[in-house]
Image: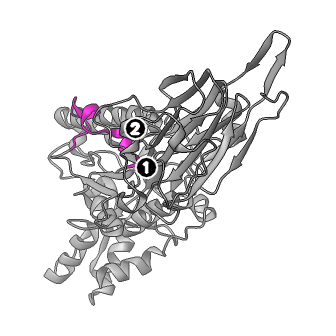
Amino acid sequence: MTEFGKSLTITETPIPGLLVAELPVHGDSRGWFKENWQREKMVAAGLPDFGPVQNNVSFNDGIGTTRGIHAEPWDKWVSVATGRIFGAWVDLREGPSFGTVFTTEIDPSRAIFVPRGVGNSYQTLEANTAYTYLVNDHWSADAAYSNLNLADETAAIAWPIPLADVEISAKDVAHPRLADITPVPPQKTLIIGANGQLGLALRELFGDAARYEYAARDSLDLADSAFASARRWRDYDTIINAAAYTAVDDAETPDGRATAWAANVIGVAALARIATEHCITLVHVSSDYVFDGTKTGAYTENDTPRPLGVYGQTKAAGDAIISTVPRHYIVRTSWVIGEGKNFVRTIAALADKGVSPHVVDDQVGRLSFTEEIAAGIRHLLDREAPFGTYNLTGSGDAISWAEIAKRIFALTGHDPARVSGVSTSEYFASASGPIAPRPKNSELDISKIRASGFQPTDMIDALIAYLH
């Protein structure tokens, strides 16, 4: 008999992510009522905000109907509208909990959240049982399933009614034993912009494991109208967007302006829709150019953007879009140094060639090495840090480009006095094309990411390591 008057409570099981919910059911002589799925209350109680898109009902008119064991590529919220079942779940996911079994009875006052890759099965204990389940992906014939035999000796499920005495489909009877099953792999992480400076650092950090997928612009373009259908997005739990249009001066031209908006705003909006629809964690890399550089002191994550040029405007617009994604990290950085052509390598080459350069001395900030940015991103994901915006640069005092150039000269065995400081306006005085306005102050406050447990390297120490 259904128990009335329970409080909404969520209980963990031996299978990670498999959660049992006790549901309040309100009844009287007329019958009963319950909220079978109430997002606000249930998420607050501890259930994942899993975004169901389809509701199914399986009606079973006899006692002993037995179905399963099916591990599907989506999350499920299983409950009973009428009747009662004995439920059995087996973890078929790759990892240390593979093969773990959990069983319990479910009636209208109890439900269970079944994460992707956990095998689900049940046996009806009452006639006219209506078994209901919500899933967060639409059924597809192309979806990959993993199935386990109901009589598997390793799982050794203690079915209340012996399997020899119940009705089972021929397909379920033929499922393989646990020893013959390939564990369900975890959802994947997609790194977009994989051939850029940060993309290469992310590839070096995450490696070639099957769960990491790398996409360069020639294989996945955010601005392409076909982007939304380019992947089976439910196969991913994380996307790291390391792609952007970063040619700040070219962005001031008519063609560059269009390209910058297409990549940094329109493409980002498509990515945000994908992440929101499929409950994907989205990591997006932002820039100091969203600020105008007039603030005294370091910019915090809460400062209002005031971009000066087209590039900064598109990055600020992209950030605003990303902030609407429920599961997002905006990683804001500055003065990025990684593989390929960059300021540090250019200055070091000039030093070696005997050139005495003029370098801007009225813009201050900190270098951000791609290896450090990649490590910070991984930290936020591994720690499951609160979603939101995090500034991430090297640590130490903010200094000018000219001072950094002098440090590079000294560290490579050259006389730093050969570097002459000039103002931004003097430096670009002879430029033939459009020049984007630069923020004079690019210092970002990194106390928030430090509070999360990540300690950025002193940028001069990182510069020394980079040069050597």
Q: Position of residue 203 (x, y in %)?
A: 29, 64
Q: Secondary structure at mark 2?
A: helix
In percent of the image, x 29 and y 81: which residue is there? Answer: 467
Asked if 276 appears above or below 427 in the picture, the reply is above
Tag 1 secondary structure: loop
Q: Closer to the observer: label 2 or label 1?
A: 1
Q: Is residue 341 visible?
A: yes
Residue 33, compared with residue 210, is above or below; it is above
Residue that label 2 marks = 318
Tell me where residue 65 appears, x and y as whole percent: 53, 32
Q: In this rendering, is residue 399 above or below 23?
A: below
Residue flagged by tag 1: what amino acid is it? Answer: Asn
Range drawn in magenta: 220-239
Circle 2 crowding by C-alpha within 10 Å: few under 14, some 14–19, many from 20: many
Visible in this render: residue 385? no
Of the image marks 2 and 1, the number of the one nearer the N terminus: 1
On screen, 310 above or below 295?
above
Residue 43 part of the magenta segment: no
Q: Nearer the viewer, residue 237 or 282?
A: 237
Give the side of residue 290 with respect to residue 8, left or right.
Answer: left
Query: Is residue 185 found left or right of 165 in the rendered image?
Result: left
To which residue does mark 1 refer? 149
**CA separation, marks 2 and 1?**
49 Å
The percent coordinates of residue 244 (x first, y second) are 29, 46
Q: Residue at 55%, 48% (x, y): give it.
A: 89
Residue 386 vs residue 408, the one in the foreground:
386
